[in-house]
Image: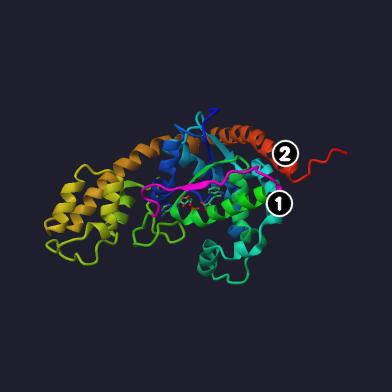
Amino acid sequence: MKDKQIIFSGMRPTGRMHIGHYFGALKNWVELQENYKCIFGITDWHALTTSFEDTASLENNIIEMAADWLAVGINPEKSILILQSWVPEHAELHLLFSMITPVGWLERNPVLKEQLQDMGLKEAVGYGHLGYPVLMASDILIYKAVKVPVGEDQVPHIEITREIARRFNYLYGEVFPEPQALLTEAPRILGIDGKKMSKSLNNYIGLSESPEEVRKKIRSMFTDPEKIRLSDAGHPERCNVFSLHRLLVNPRLGEIEKECREGKWGCVSCKEELSELMVKFLEKVVPHREKYQREKHLVKEILWEGSKKARQIAQATLEEAKEAMKLSYDF
Ligand code: AMP
Ligand code: TRP
Protein backbone atom coordinates (compact mmCIF):
# COMPACT_ATOMS: atom_id res chain seq x y z
CA MET A 1 0.00 0.00 0.00
CA LYS A 2 3.02 2.24 0.55
CA ASP A 3 3.36 3.95 -2.80
CA LYS A 4 -0.30 4.22 -3.61
CA GLN A 5 -1.95 7.62 -3.74
CA ILE A 6 -4.39 8.36 -0.97
CA ILE A 7 -8.11 8.77 -1.45
CA PHE A 8 -10.60 10.01 1.10
CA SER A 9 -14.35 10.21 0.85
CA GLY A 10 -17.19 10.20 3.29
CA MET A 11 -20.92 10.32 3.74
CA ARG A 12 -23.16 11.64 6.45
CA PRO A 13 -24.95 8.74 8.18
CA THR A 14 -28.42 9.20 6.78
CA GLY A 15 -29.30 5.50 7.06
CA ARG A 16 -29.92 3.20 4.14
CA MET A 17 -28.33 4.04 0.83
CA HIS A 18 -30.11 4.48 -2.49
CA ILE A 19 -28.98 3.86 -6.06
CA GLY A 20 -27.99 7.56 -6.35
CA HIS A 21 -25.37 6.97 -3.66
CA TYR A 22 -24.31 3.78 -5.38
CA PHE A 23 -23.93 4.98 -8.95
CA GLY A 24 -22.88 8.51 -7.95
CA ALA A 25 -20.14 7.52 -5.52
CA LEU A 26 -20.02 4.05 -3.94
CA LYS A 27 -19.46 2.15 -7.18
CA ASN A 28 -16.42 4.32 -7.77
CA TRP A 29 -15.15 3.71 -4.23
CA VAL A 30 -15.34 -0.06 -4.73
CA GLU A 31 -13.29 0.14 -7.93
CA LEU A 32 -10.74 2.60 -6.55
CA GLN A 33 -9.87 0.25 -3.70
CA GLU A 34 -7.79 -1.77 -6.13
CA ASN A 35 -5.33 0.96 -7.05
CA TYR A 36 -5.38 3.50 -4.24
CA LYS A 37 -5.00 3.58 -0.53
CA CYS A 38 -8.58 4.40 0.35
CA ILE A 39 -9.99 5.83 3.55
CA PHE A 40 -13.77 6.07 3.78
CA GLY A 41 -15.45 7.91 6.60
CA ILE A 42 -18.88 7.94 8.17
CA THR A 43 -19.04 11.61 9.01
CA ASP A 44 -21.30 11.71 12.05
CA TRP A 45 -20.24 15.23 13.04
CA HIS A 46 -21.33 16.47 9.63
CA ALA A 47 -24.76 14.96 10.28
CA LEU A 48 -25.08 17.23 13.32
CA THR A 49 -24.67 20.40 11.26
CA THR A 50 -28.28 20.18 10.12
CA SER A 51 -29.79 17.45 12.31
CA PHE A 52 -28.54 18.46 15.75
CA GLU A 53 -32.04 18.07 17.19
CA ASP A 54 -32.48 14.53 15.98
CA THR A 55 -29.56 12.57 17.39
CA ALA A 56 -31.56 9.52 18.53
CA SER A 57 -31.42 7.88 15.10
CA LEU A 58 -27.72 8.53 14.55
CA GLU A 59 -26.41 5.25 15.96
CA ASN A 60 -28.79 3.13 13.92
CA ASN A 61 -28.12 5.18 10.79
CA ILE A 62 -24.38 4.57 11.17
CA ILE A 63 -24.92 0.80 11.25
CA GLU A 64 -27.40 0.88 8.36
CA MET A 65 -25.03 2.88 6.21
CA ALA A 66 -21.97 0.80 7.06
CA ALA A 67 -23.95 -2.39 6.27
CA ASP A 68 -24.74 -1.00 2.81
CA TRP A 69 -21.12 -0.01 2.18
CA LEU A 70 -19.88 -3.47 3.13
CA ALA A 71 -22.62 -5.17 1.13
CA VAL A 72 -21.73 -3.39 -2.11
CA GLY A 73 -18.08 -4.34 -1.78
CA ILE A 74 -16.24 -1.81 0.36
CA ASN A 75 -13.67 -4.17 1.76
CA PRO A 76 -12.07 -3.49 5.16
CA GLU A 77 -9.12 -5.68 4.15
CA LYS A 78 -8.34 -3.25 1.34
CA SER A 79 -9.59 0.08 2.70
CA ILE A 80 -9.68 1.86 6.01
CA LEU A 81 -13.20 2.54 7.27
CA ILE A 82 -13.56 5.16 9.94
CA LEU A 83 -16.16 6.82 12.09
CA GLN A 84 -15.29 10.51 12.07
CA SER A 85 -15.89 11.12 15.78
CA TRP A 86 -13.56 8.22 16.63
CA VAL A 87 -10.71 10.11 14.99
CA PRO A 88 -10.79 13.32 17.06
CA GLU A 89 -7.74 14.70 15.22
CA HIS A 90 -10.18 15.79 12.50
CA ALA A 91 -11.67 18.24 15.01
CA GLU A 92 -8.32 19.70 16.00
CA LEU A 93 -7.30 20.28 12.40
CA HIS A 94 -10.74 21.76 11.74
CA LEU A 95 -10.11 24.26 14.52
CA LEU A 96 -6.74 25.27 13.06
CA PHE A 97 -8.25 25.60 9.57
CA SER A 98 -11.11 27.70 10.96
CA MET A 99 -8.55 30.36 11.93
CA ILE A 100 -7.35 30.84 8.36
CA THR A 101 -10.67 30.50 6.52
CA PRO A 102 -12.41 33.77 5.61
CA VAL A 103 -16.12 33.68 6.42
CA GLY A 104 -16.81 35.08 2.93
CA TRP A 105 -15.67 31.82 1.34
CA LEU A 106 -18.21 29.92 3.41
CA GLU A 107 -21.06 32.36 2.90
CA ARG A 108 -20.58 32.23 -0.85
CA ASN A 109 -20.70 28.42 -0.90
CA PRO A 110 -23.52 27.50 -3.34
CA VAL A 111 -24.23 24.24 -1.49
CA LEU A 112 -24.98 26.18 1.69
CA LYS A 113 -27.16 28.68 -0.16
CA GLU A 114 -29.21 25.88 -1.67
CA GLN A 115 -29.57 24.10 1.67
CA LEU A 116 -30.72 27.25 3.41
CA GLN A 117 -33.32 27.82 0.73
CA ASP A 118 -34.54 24.21 0.92
CA MET A 119 -34.70 24.27 4.71
CA GLY A 120 -36.20 27.75 4.86
CA LEU A 121 -33.41 28.76 7.25
CA LYS A 122 -32.15 31.92 5.56
CA GLU A 123 -30.18 33.84 8.20
CA ALA A 124 -30.37 31.29 11.00
CA VAL A 125 -27.40 29.23 9.87
CA GLY A 126 -25.45 27.62 12.72
CA TYR A 127 -21.74 28.21 13.28
CA GLY A 128 -21.02 24.52 12.69
CA HIS A 129 -23.16 24.41 9.58
CA LEU A 130 -21.38 27.41 8.09
CA GLY A 131 -18.11 25.61 8.76
CA TYR A 132 -19.27 22.37 7.06
CA PRO A 133 -16.64 22.66 4.28
CA VAL A 134 -13.89 23.44 6.80
CA LEU A 135 -14.62 20.17 8.58
CA MET A 136 -14.69 18.44 5.19
CA ALA A 137 -11.30 19.97 4.39
CA SER A 138 -9.89 18.55 7.61
CA ASP A 139 -11.38 15.09 6.85
CA ILE A 140 -9.59 15.08 3.51
CA LEU A 141 -6.35 16.87 4.29
CA ILE A 142 -5.58 15.10 7.56
CA TYR A 143 -4.81 12.08 5.34
CA LYS A 144 -3.18 14.21 2.62
CA ALA A 145 -5.66 12.67 0.20
CA VAL A 146 -5.17 13.71 -3.41
CA LYS A 147 -8.48 12.50 -4.81
CA VAL A 148 -12.01 12.64 -3.45
CA PRO A 149 -14.61 10.45 -5.16
CA VAL A 150 -18.03 12.09 -4.72
CA GLY A 151 -21.20 13.02 -6.59
CA GLU A 152 -21.43 16.29 -8.47
CA ASP A 153 -23.16 18.17 -5.63
CA GLN A 154 -20.01 17.97 -3.49
CA VAL A 155 -17.68 19.66 -5.97
CA PRO A 156 -18.03 23.22 -4.53
CA HIS A 157 -17.08 21.89 -1.09
CA ILE A 158 -13.96 20.32 -2.49
CA GLU A 159 -13.05 23.58 -4.15
CA ILE A 160 -13.03 25.15 -0.67
CA THR A 161 -10.77 22.32 0.55
CA ARG A 162 -8.32 23.25 -2.20
CA GLU A 163 -8.45 26.90 -1.20
CA ILE A 164 -7.82 26.08 2.44
CA ALA A 165 -4.85 23.87 1.51
CA ARG A 166 -3.44 26.60 -0.71
CA ARG A 167 -3.83 29.23 1.99
CA PHE A 168 -2.26 27.05 4.67
CA ASN A 169 0.71 26.24 2.45
CA TYR A 170 1.14 29.92 1.56
CA LEU A 171 1.05 30.99 5.21
CA TYR A 172 3.10 28.26 6.85
CA GLY A 173 4.89 26.28 4.14
CA GLU A 174 4.01 23.31 1.98
CA VAL A 175 2.19 20.69 4.06
CA PHE A 176 -1.00 19.79 2.18
CA PRO A 177 -1.77 18.60 -1.36
CA GLU A 178 -4.62 20.25 -3.30
CA PRO A 179 -7.06 17.38 -3.74
CA GLN A 180 -9.33 16.89 -6.72
CA ALA A 181 -12.89 15.64 -6.94
CA LEU A 182 -13.33 12.36 -8.80
CA LEU A 183 -16.71 11.98 -10.45
CA THR A 184 -18.30 8.84 -11.89
CA GLU A 185 -19.75 8.73 -15.38
CA ALA A 186 -23.10 9.32 -13.64
CA PRO A 187 -22.40 12.09 -11.13
CA ARG A 188 -26.04 13.10 -10.74
CA ILE A 189 -28.64 10.35 -10.61
CA LEU A 190 -32.25 11.44 -10.98
CA GLY A 191 -35.08 10.11 -8.88
CA ILE A 192 -38.45 8.74 -9.93
CA ASP A 193 -39.83 12.30 -10.22
CA GLY A 194 -37.00 13.50 -12.46
CA LYS A 195 -35.35 15.61 -9.71
CA LYS A 196 -31.98 14.72 -8.17
CA MET A 197 -32.43 11.46 -6.29
CA SER A 198 -32.32 12.16 -2.58
CA LYS A 199 -33.64 10.81 0.65
CA SER A 200 -35.35 14.05 1.61
CA LEU A 201 -37.36 14.19 -1.62
CA ASN A 202 -38.52 10.59 -1.15
CA ASN A 203 -37.92 9.96 -4.86
CA TYR A 204 -35.34 7.23 -4.41
CA ILE A 205 -34.89 3.53 -5.07
CA GLY A 206 -33.20 2.10 -1.99
CA LEU A 207 -30.48 -0.54 -2.13
CA SER A 208 -32.51 -2.71 0.24
CA GLU A 209 -35.88 -2.14 -1.42
CA SER A 210 -38.17 -5.18 -1.92
CA PRO A 211 -38.86 -6.36 -5.51
CA GLU A 212 -42.53 -5.26 -5.22
CA GLU A 213 -41.48 -1.82 -4.07
CA VAL A 214 -38.92 -1.53 -6.89
CA ARG A 215 -41.54 -2.45 -9.49
CA LYS A 216 -44.02 0.00 -8.04
CA LYS A 217 -41.50 2.84 -7.99
CA ILE A 218 -40.23 2.18 -11.50
CA ARG A 219 -43.79 2.05 -12.80
CA SER A 220 -44.32 5.59 -11.51
CA MET A 221 -41.11 6.99 -13.02
CA PHE A 222 -41.16 10.05 -15.26
CA THR A 223 -40.15 9.35 -18.86
CA ASP A 224 -39.74 11.49 -21.98
CA PRO A 225 -42.74 13.89 -21.76
CA GLU A 226 -43.09 13.90 -25.56
CA LYS A 227 -43.68 10.16 -25.74
CA ILE A 228 -47.26 9.59 -24.73
CA ARG A 229 -48.28 6.67 -26.94
CA LEU A 230 -46.16 3.65 -27.82
CA SER A 231 -46.02 4.84 -31.43
CA ASP A 232 -44.66 8.32 -30.52
CA ALA A 233 -40.96 8.79 -31.31
CA GLY A 234 -39.02 8.85 -28.01
CA HIS A 235 -35.86 10.70 -26.99
CA PRO A 236 -33.81 8.27 -24.90
CA GLU A 237 -31.22 10.96 -24.16
CA ARG A 238 -33.91 12.83 -22.18
CA CYS A 239 -35.36 9.80 -20.45
CA ASN A 240 -34.32 8.76 -16.97
CA VAL A 241 -35.63 5.21 -17.46
CA PHE A 242 -33.23 4.87 -20.37
CA SER A 243 -30.31 6.25 -18.35
CA LEU A 244 -30.96 3.59 -15.70
CA HIS A 245 -30.94 0.88 -18.40
CA ARG A 246 -27.53 2.20 -19.33
CA LEU A 247 -26.27 2.22 -15.72
CA LEU A 248 -27.43 -1.35 -15.22
CA VAL A 249 -25.64 -2.30 -18.45
CA ASN A 250 -28.65 -3.73 -20.24
CA PRO A 251 -27.23 -5.81 -23.13
CA ARG A 252 -30.26 -4.74 -25.19
CA LEU A 253 -29.46 -1.04 -24.81
CA GLY A 254 -28.84 -0.37 -28.51
CA GLU A 255 -32.02 -2.16 -29.51
CA ILE A 256 -34.11 -0.29 -26.93
CA GLU A 257 -32.69 3.03 -28.05
CA LYS A 258 -33.46 2.36 -31.70
CA GLU A 259 -36.97 1.02 -31.14
CA CYS A 260 -37.85 3.84 -28.74
CA ARG A 261 -36.81 6.44 -31.32
CA GLU A 262 -38.79 4.66 -34.02
CA GLY A 263 -41.95 4.47 -31.91
CA LYS A 264 -41.81 0.67 -31.79
CA TRP A 265 -41.11 0.28 -28.06
CA GLY A 266 -43.32 1.62 -25.30
CA CYS A 267 -42.55 3.04 -21.87
CA VAL A 268 -44.56 0.35 -20.06
CA SER A 269 -42.45 -2.50 -21.46
CA CYS A 270 -39.33 -0.40 -21.02
CA LYS A 271 -40.10 0.04 -17.33
CA GLU A 272 -40.93 -3.65 -16.87
CA GLU A 273 -37.61 -4.63 -18.35
CA LEU A 274 -35.83 -2.09 -16.16
CA SER A 275 -37.61 -3.41 -13.04
CA GLU A 276 -36.35 -6.92 -13.69
CA LEU A 277 -32.79 -5.69 -14.21
CA MET A 278 -32.98 -3.59 -11.05
CA VAL A 279 -34.41 -6.41 -8.94
CA LYS A 280 -31.59 -8.71 -10.10
CA PHE A 281 -28.99 -6.05 -9.37
CA LEU A 282 -30.35 -5.41 -5.88
CA GLU A 283 -30.61 -9.15 -5.14
CA LYS A 284 -26.85 -9.33 -5.49
CA VAL A 285 -26.50 -6.71 -2.77
CA VAL A 286 -29.09 -7.74 -0.19
CA PRO A 287 -27.90 -11.12 1.14
CA HIS A 288 -24.55 -9.70 2.23
CA ARG A 289 -26.26 -6.74 3.79
CA GLU A 290 -28.36 -8.81 6.15
CA LYS A 291 -25.30 -10.46 7.61
CA TYR A 292 -23.84 -7.11 8.69
CA GLN A 293 -27.15 -5.80 9.91
CA ARG A 294 -27.63 -8.89 12.08
CA GLU A 295 -24.12 -8.81 13.45
CA LYS A 296 -23.71 -5.21 14.46
CA HIS A 297 -20.63 -5.99 16.51
CA LEU A 298 -18.84 -6.87 13.25
CA VAL A 299 -19.54 -3.41 11.86
CA LYS A 300 -18.49 -1.76 15.11
CA GLU A 301 -15.24 -3.69 15.13
CA ILE A 302 -14.45 -2.76 11.53
CA LEU A 303 -15.01 0.93 12.26
CA TRP A 304 -13.08 0.75 15.53
CA GLU A 305 -10.05 -0.95 13.98
CA GLY A 306 -10.16 1.36 10.95
CA SER A 307 -10.36 4.46 13.11
CA LYS A 308 -7.41 3.24 15.17
CA LYS A 309 -5.30 2.82 12.04
CA ALA A 310 -6.43 6.16 10.65
CA ARG A 311 -5.48 7.94 13.87
CA GLN A 312 -1.84 7.07 13.32
CA ILE A 313 -1.83 8.84 9.95
CA ALA A 314 -3.96 11.68 11.31
CA GLN A 315 -1.69 12.28 14.29
CA ALA A 316 1.39 12.48 12.08
CA THR A 317 -0.23 15.05 9.76
CA LEU A 318 -1.53 17.08 12.68
CA GLU A 319 1.95 17.20 14.19
CA GLU A 320 3.36 18.33 10.87
CA ALA A 321 0.73 21.06 10.56
CA LYS A 322 1.37 22.27 14.11
CA GLU A 323 5.09 22.32 13.53
CA ALA A 324 4.60 24.38 10.37
CA MET A 325 2.44 26.78 12.38
CA LYS A 326 5.09 27.00 15.13
CA LEU A 327 2.70 25.43 17.60
CA SER A 328 4.92 22.50 18.53
CA TYR A 329 6.31 24.36 21.52
CA ASP A 330 9.53 23.04 22.91
CA PHE A 331 9.60 24.69 26.36
P1 AMP B 1 -25.61 12.57 0.66
O1 AMP B 1 -26.42 11.43 1.17
O2 AMP B 1 -26.44 13.55 -0.08
O3 AMP B 1 -24.83 13.19 1.77
O4 AMP B 1 -24.56 12.01 -0.41
C1 AMP B 1 -23.51 11.12 -0.14
C2 AMP B 1 -22.67 10.92 -1.40
O5 AMP B 1 -23.45 10.35 -2.45
C3 AMP B 1 -22.06 12.20 -1.98
O6 AMP B 1 -20.83 11.90 -2.59
C4 AMP B 1 -23.07 12.59 -3.01
O7 AMP B 1 -22.53 13.41 -4.01
C5 AMP B 1 -23.50 11.23 -3.56
N1 AMP B 1 -24.89 11.29 -4.04
C6 AMP B 1 -26.02 11.41 -3.29
N2 AMP B 1 -27.12 11.47 -4.06
C7 AMP B 1 -26.68 11.40 -5.35
C8 AMP B 1 -27.33 11.43 -6.63
N3 AMP B 1 -28.65 11.54 -6.74
N4 AMP B 1 -26.55 11.35 -7.73
C9 AMP B 1 -25.20 11.24 -7.63
N5 AMP B 1 -24.54 11.21 -6.46
C10 AMP B 1 -25.25 11.29 -5.33
N1 TRP C 1 -20.42 16.23 2.52
C1 TRP C 1 -20.41 14.85 2.18
C2 TRP C 1 -21.83 14.42 1.84
O1 TRP C 1 -22.79 15.06 2.14
C3 TRP C 1 -19.87 13.99 3.28
C4 TRP C 1 -18.43 14.26 3.60
C5 TRP C 1 -17.93 14.69 4.78
C6 TRP C 1 -17.32 14.11 2.72
N2 TRP C 1 -16.58 14.83 4.73
C7 TRP C 1 -16.17 14.50 3.48
C8 TRP C 1 -17.19 13.74 1.40
C9 TRP C 1 -14.91 14.50 2.91
C10 TRP C 1 -15.91 13.73 0.83
C11 TRP C 1 -14.78 14.11 1.58
O2 TRP C 1 -22.00 13.35 1.33
Q: Is residue 115 above or below residue 10?
A: below
**Residue 259: where, in percent of width, then height?**
13, 54
In the rendered image, residue 72, in percent from the top left (x then y), is placed at 42, 38
Q: Secondary structure at mark 2?
A: helix
Q: Residues within 10 Å of mark 2 (few under 14, many from 20)?
A: some
Q: In the image, residue 130 lies at what x, y percent?
A: 62, 61
* Residue located beneath label 2 in the image: 319
Q: Main secondary structure of the magenta part?
A: loop
User: Which amino acid does the dot numbered 2 rest on?
Assistant: Glu
Q: Is residue 139 left or right of residue 199?
A: right
Q: Which of these two is toward me, 288 or 140?
A: 140
Circle count: 2
Question: Mark 1: which amino acid?
Answer: Leu
Rendered view: 24 above or below 300: below
Q: Residue at x 37, y 54 (%)?
A: 189
Q: Please tell me which residue lies in front, 168 or 126.
A: 168
Q: Which mark is residue 95?
A: 1
Residue 50, placed above or below residue 45:
below
Query: Residue 241, position in %: x, y?
Result: 27, 55
Give the CA separation, mark 2 to mark 1. Answer: 14 Å
In the image, which residues are magenta? Answer: 171-188
Q: Earlier in the sequence, mark 2 or mark 1?
A: 1
Q: Residue at x 71, y 55 (%)?
A: 99
Does the numbered disc 2 mark a residue whose Cβ is under 8 Å from ligand 2?
no
| Element on which disc 1 rests | helix
Of 7 and 180, the residue lying toward us: 180
Residue 194 appears left or right of 297: left
Disc 1: CA contacts within 10 A as few (<14), some (14-19) or many (>=20): some
Coloring applied to the structure: rainbow
- Examine the rendered structure and indicate whether residue 9 appears above or below residue 156: above
In the rendered image, is residue 272 in sight? yes
